[in-house]
Amino acid sequence: MKGRAMGERRGTGSRGQGTAGETRGPRVLRRAIVRIVLAALAIVVSAAAPLRADDGYGLWLRYPRVDDAARMAEYRASITRLVLPGESPTLRAARDELRRGLRGMLGMEIPISPSVSASGALLVGTPASSRRIAALGLGEELRRVGDEGFVIRAASVGGRRTIVIAANRDVGVLYGAFHLLRHLQTHRPLADLSIVQSPRIGRRVLNHWDNLDRSVERGYAGRSLWEWDALPDSLSARYVDYARANASIGINGTVLTNVNANARVLTAPYLHKVRALAGVFRPYGIRVYLTARFSAPMEIGGLETADPLDPAVRAWWKAKADEIYRTIPDFGGFLVKANSEGQPGPQDYQRTHADGANMLAEAVAPHGGIVMWRAFVYSAETPTDRVRQAHDEFHPLDGRFQGNVLVQVKNGPLDFQPREPFHPLFGAMPRTPLMLELQITQEYLGHASDLVYLAPLFEEVLDADTHARGAGSTVAKVIDGSLEGHRLTAIAGVANTGTDRNWTGHPFGQANWYAFGRLAWDPDAASAEIAEEWLRMTFTHDPSFVALVKAMMMRSRETAVEYMTPLGLHHIMARDHHYGPGPWVEGGGRADWTSVYYHRADTLGVGFDRTAAGSSAVAQYAAPVAARWGSRQTVPDSLLLWFHRVGWTERMRSGRTLWDELVHRYDAGVDSVRGMRRTWDGVRGTIDPERHADVAARLATQEKVARWWRDAALLYFQQFSRQPFPPGAEPPAHSLEFYRRRVGPEVPEFGEATHAIARPGFSGPSRPR
Ligand code: GCV
């Protein structure tokens, strides 16, 4: 290996040699042949070597050596030196990443060169950092890509074959560098490179529900990454890797603290800790944001009220904002959960959400800050169908928010369920910038045991047509600002990261972090393509592995819906920890925290009537959507029991009765997990044993989780349907009582399946009807 690297360095030689080589054809040819032979040798050597253990820390930025001889030869011939002038921290980050990535993938050190003195240069920068780039005449393209976009081009610079990464700002250079690396990581060709990209959404933000004691609400991957006790003096090396990972997928903001907020983070000692983190993240284009506890003026400011119309309160927030910006000049702004699930808010003073948001907005506006005000609200008294309350509350406030306020809306109107219809506020507040909140952490989707690739869920909501301005008014167009002409645009994902060595607990949780970033950058990106690139970068290019595991990932969300909440069922999980089934959950203070409130099962049928005959929640959607979902004839099966109450013996599209269909769906979900296990067993040996074993063990648990859900839900609903299990259905392993007695999140044990139904693969639809 050493010899090869040295040989390569000799081959690329000094500047003089390289320049001369361009005019001497045979020498170039000889070099190319040597490179190809060496690359082929490398492949033979690496094929013989055992697969190296991998603990998952490197995420999708592992940069293993290219194992395709032709590609390796192409890459080594095309990139022989790096020309990246400029010394800003962001340009340094881009240079370091390119060197790291190229070293890993090409198996050789790519020399830094001050100028494009030979063919094969990778020329990187902005018109300000590089005269060469300024002279390339990229003006028109650069105008199109804005502050964060980039252009990647095959070009001739002074007659020399060059690859150019150009941007207007340093951060665009960094994004372009990561993009080119991804291009190489996925083994795409370099010939005729011509890529022009910019993000569709301005603020692409992670929301950490991290507490100051380092616990993480709904976190399943260890403790919080933020070492509050050690900050600001000690900076974990992990912060840089967190920033690299985010920058590689275009995430440009991080809300460090839980929306169930602690005012202490706004005190001076904590702001200095936050400043230290901001300093690490800044070169990577990432701004920090904090959650603002509405009662902070009382809790840390000594005031007697937090009334947003009280002059002293307003002055306190202004002074606090000034202090924050003195400490962290590029602070992004506040995220606020108010008058929701016990959090204080403006309604405590008979003020509106707009009053509260605008007070904070005024405080941060002089500094360029924004306020992300959450619409996840529902009354403490449960007066009406919970899923209609956010719309009831916020729709009348449209147009009443300051220009630097975004209303942050969850993908669905309830709470990150395995499937929900899109939130009716999308399209219903044209004069207010709305941002989409997705949950990357798997609160309702099997925590860190279940393999559920979430991009199809994210894609489903982004593609959903609100019909707000006629057909084609997708949620993506609402949040990218194009539907109503908003310039302030944003998207948030509730993070799934923690101190676990592999960051996300489940190795496939990394795919959900990755997919969030990719879709935030381009909401039209396809989840299947994202899965494929992630698999190639994270595991291997082995074509059979990629094809099989991609199909498994693409099916996995629908699989989870089938074994958890098929046919539009929702909120029937266990209380509090939300892991495993709990259709029997009732009582305990508030109705809308129970399962019986949502499924309403009795001997006649099951489901929540949200039509005009019921809560009328469906009327919150635009007319074509309301008509489709409000009719039993046209509602898709996937949302049936969300909007309708259906009799147990009513016929479904399949011809089965509702009861038989329910059994069929739950069975299909369990069956599909068994298929996932078979698929994963079948790819043993194509990736490192460490990650293979980890995923295999989690899939074994997932099968138990699926059976647990299926048995518990069906036994419970059978009490009402009074129907037998249809012929061929797998009998439950335990009694209803057995399942009801489990209150903790422990997964029950099962004997060997006596009834495994063999289904070969994942040929079913990956999108619901
Ligand atoms: C951060 C759900 C979760 C809560 C979460 C809340 C929210 O209710 O269970 O843990 O609180 O959503 O999004 O604010």
Image (cartoon, grey):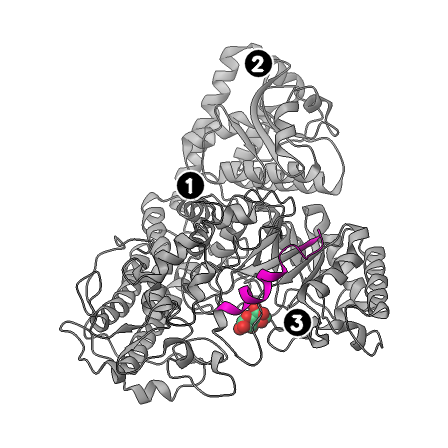
- Residue 163 has which mark? none
**Amino acid type for the residue under numbered disc 3:** Asn
Q: Which residue is labeled 1 in the image? A: 45
Tell which tag, 1 or 2, sits nearer the viewer: 2
- Pick whichever of labels 3 and 2 is earlier in the sequence: 2
Tell which tag, 3 or 1, sits nearer the viewer: 3
Q: Give the alpha-carbon distance from disc 3 to disc 1, as whole Å.
A: 48 Å
Element at label 1: helix
Q: Which residues are magenta?
A: 388-405
Name above or below for residue 416 compared with residue 725: above
Q: Which residue is labeled 2 in the image? A: 22
Residue 509: percent from left, percent from top: 48, 60
Residue 699: percent from left, percent from top: 36, 66
Q: Residue at x 38, y 89 (%)?
A: 741
Q: Is residue 728 left or right of residue 290?
A: left
Along the line of sight, the residue nearer the viewer: 731 or 404:
404
**Ligand 1 placement by image quarter:** bottom right
Q: Residue furthest left?
A: 727
Along the line of sight, the residue nearer the viewer: 16 or 643:
643
**Number of numbered discs:** 3
Q: Residue at x 41, y 65 (%)?
A: 418
Along the line of sight, the residue nearer the viewer: 612 or 162:
612
Task: Give yes or no for residue 672 being in the magenta stretch.
Answer: no
Element at label 3: loop
Residue 326: percent from left, percent from top: 85, 56
Q: Give the alpha-carbon distance from disc 3 to disc 2, as whole Å.
A: 59 Å
Question: Residue 222, can we see it?
Answer: no
**Amino acid type for the residue under numbered disc 2:** Glu
Q: Which residue is labeled 3 in the image? A: 211
